[in-house]
Image: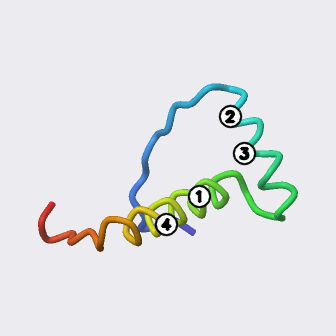
């Protein structure tokens, strides 16, 4: 089943990816889903500190 979600290629040091894969496995998730959750948490933290990001302003 194809996803309608936009794709984004991410480059990072190999050790980061290895650690993310380890964390993902510990949490029963794919590395992709783990990264998605990390980004979601970071956005939430940013918006709590700085206010909501209005996507219409982008």
Q: Along the horizontal axis of the image, is 56 left or right of 22? A: left
Q: Mark 3: give few (<14), some (14-19) or many (20+) Cα within 10 Å.
A: some
Q: Position of residue 58 (x, y in %)?
A: 15, 60
Please tell me which residue is depicted at 31% across the width and 65% down the height of the picture.
50
Residue at image mark 1: 38
Residue at image mark 4: 3
Precedes in sequence: disc 3 or disc 4:
4
How much space separates mark 2 and mark 1, taking CA atoms?
13 Å
How much space separates mark 2 and mark 3, taking CA atoms?
6 Å
Precedes in sequence: disc 2 or disc 4:
4
Locate the N terminus by quadrant.
bottom right
Marks 3 and 1 close (CB-CB < 8 Å): yes
Label 2 sits on a secondary structure element that is helix
Task: From the image, state whether disc 2 or disc 4 is nearer to you.
Answer: 2
Residue at image mark 2: 16
Precedes in sequence: disc 2 or disc 1:
2
In terms of image quadrants, where is residue 27? bottom right
Marks 2 and 3 close (CB-CB < 8 Å): yes
Q: Mark 1: give few (<14), some (14-19) or many (20+) Cα within 10 Å.
A: few
Please tell me which residue is depicted at 77% across the width and 55% down the height of the picture.
24
Residue at image mark 3: 20
Task: From the image, state whether disc 3 or disc 4 is nearer to you.
Answer: 3
Precedes in sequence: disc 4 or disc 1:
4
Q: Position of residue 37 (x, y in %)?
A: 60, 64
Precedes in sequence: disc 3 or disc 1:
3
Label 3 sits on a secondary structure element that is helix
Label 4 sits on a secondary structure element that is loop
């Amino acid at each position: 089943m194809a996803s309608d979600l936009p794709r984004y290629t991410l480059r990072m040091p190999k050790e980061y990816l290895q650690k993310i894969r380890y964390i993902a496995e510990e949490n029963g998730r794919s590395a992709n889903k783990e990264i998605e959750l990390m980004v979601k948490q970071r956005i939430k933290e940013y918006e709590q500190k700085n206010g909501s990001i209005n996507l219409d302003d982008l």
